[in-house]
Image (spheres, grey):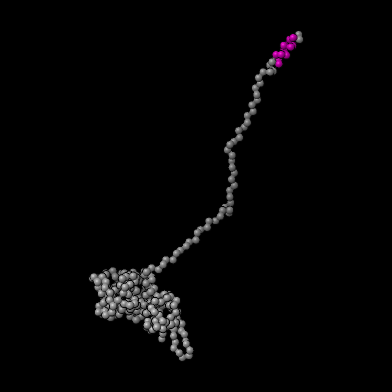
Amino acid sequence: MKFRYLILLIAVLAMSCGPKKGIVTKKKRSSSNKTVVVKETKEAEKKPEISAPVITESKPPSSVEVYISLYAEIAKDKMKTHKIPASITLAQGILESGSGKGRLAVKANNHFGIKCHGWTGAKIYHDDDRSQECFRKYPRAEMSYEDHSEFLTGRKRYAGLFDLKPDDYKSWAKGLRAAGYATDRKYPEKLISLIERYKLYQYDDEVLNGAQSKSTRKSTTIIEGVKKNISKKHLVVKGDTLYSLSRLYKTTVAEIKATNNLKSNDLTIGQELIIPN
C-alpha cells in the first residue's frame, strides 16, 4: 500500500518538474512622432523697417547756363542802348559761339561770327562758307557784343527789325533770317528753341518792366568828409564784368581798373570795387 503511494508521489513530482511556458509581457511602443507646440510671437514685438534716406545730387550747370550767367547783363545793357531784345542777343551768342567754346570765341573773342567787312582791327582767319575767311578779332568778349549791336543798328537791311516790339522774340528771330543775317533755314527755330528752353525772355522783361535780376546787385554810397566827391562801392556778383559795370555806372573800364589797381579784367565773386565818378 505504501508502495502505491510512493509511486503516485513520484509521478506527481515528475509532472511538476516539466517545462513551463514563460509569461511574455508586451511593452507598448511609444510614438516616435512628437507634437511640438510653438507659441506665436506678437506683432508688436516685430521691429519696424527703417528705410534708407534718399540723397539727391545737384547737377552742375551746363555750358549754356554758364554762358548765360556770364553775358546776360551785357545783353540787357545792349537792349537798353540799342533796342535789340536781350533774349535774341543771348540766343545768337550761344548758337554762334558754341556757348563760348567755338574757335572764334576762344581765339578771337568773336561770339557772333562777324566777318571783317572793312574792319581795320585785329583779324583771324577761319573756314566758314569759304576756306580761311577773315573774321574780326577783339581784345575782350564785351567788345564783340558791342560790335554786334552796332552791326545790326548800322545797316539798312536790318532797319525793319526795330519796328517790331522789343519783346517779340519770335518775329525778331524770323526777321533776322529774312534780312539775310543767316543762310540756315532753321536759324529762327534754333533761336526760338534756345530762348524758350532757357527762358531768355525773362531778360527782356527785366529791361522793359524794370524787374530785378536774380543776381542782386549790392552797392553802398560812401561820403568822404563834408562836400567831397561821392564814391560808390560795388560787390561783384555772378555775371559781372568790367564792361557791364562801366555801362551800369556810366564810367569806363580803364577808370575802374585804375581806381582799384587792377592788373587784368578778371573779377572774383564777392570782390569789392570802388566805382569812380
Question: From where the camera sits, is residue 253 visible?
Answer: yes
Q: Position of residue 41 (x, y in %)?
A: 58, 50
Please name the residue shown 25% across and 79% down the image. 118
Please name the residue shown 44% across and 64% down the image. 57
- Does the stretch in magenta take in 140? no
Q: Position of residue 200 (x, y in %)?
A: 37, 73
Please name the residue shown 59% across and 39% down the image. 34
Please name the residue shown 39% across and 73% down the image. 69
Q: Is residue 164 above or below residue 15?
A: below
Q: Where on the picture, by quarter, is residue 106?
A: bottom left
Seen from the viewer's position, the closer of residues 128 and 261 is: 261
Numbered range of the magenta stretch: 3-13
- Does the stretch in magenta take in 4? yes
Q: Position of residue 210 (x, y in %)?
A: 40, 79
Q: Is residue 189 above or below residue 146?
A: above
Seen from the viewer's position, the closer of residues 270 and 196 is: 270
Q: Is residue 230 above or below residue 28?
A: below
Question: From where the camera sits, is residue 170 visible?
Answer: no
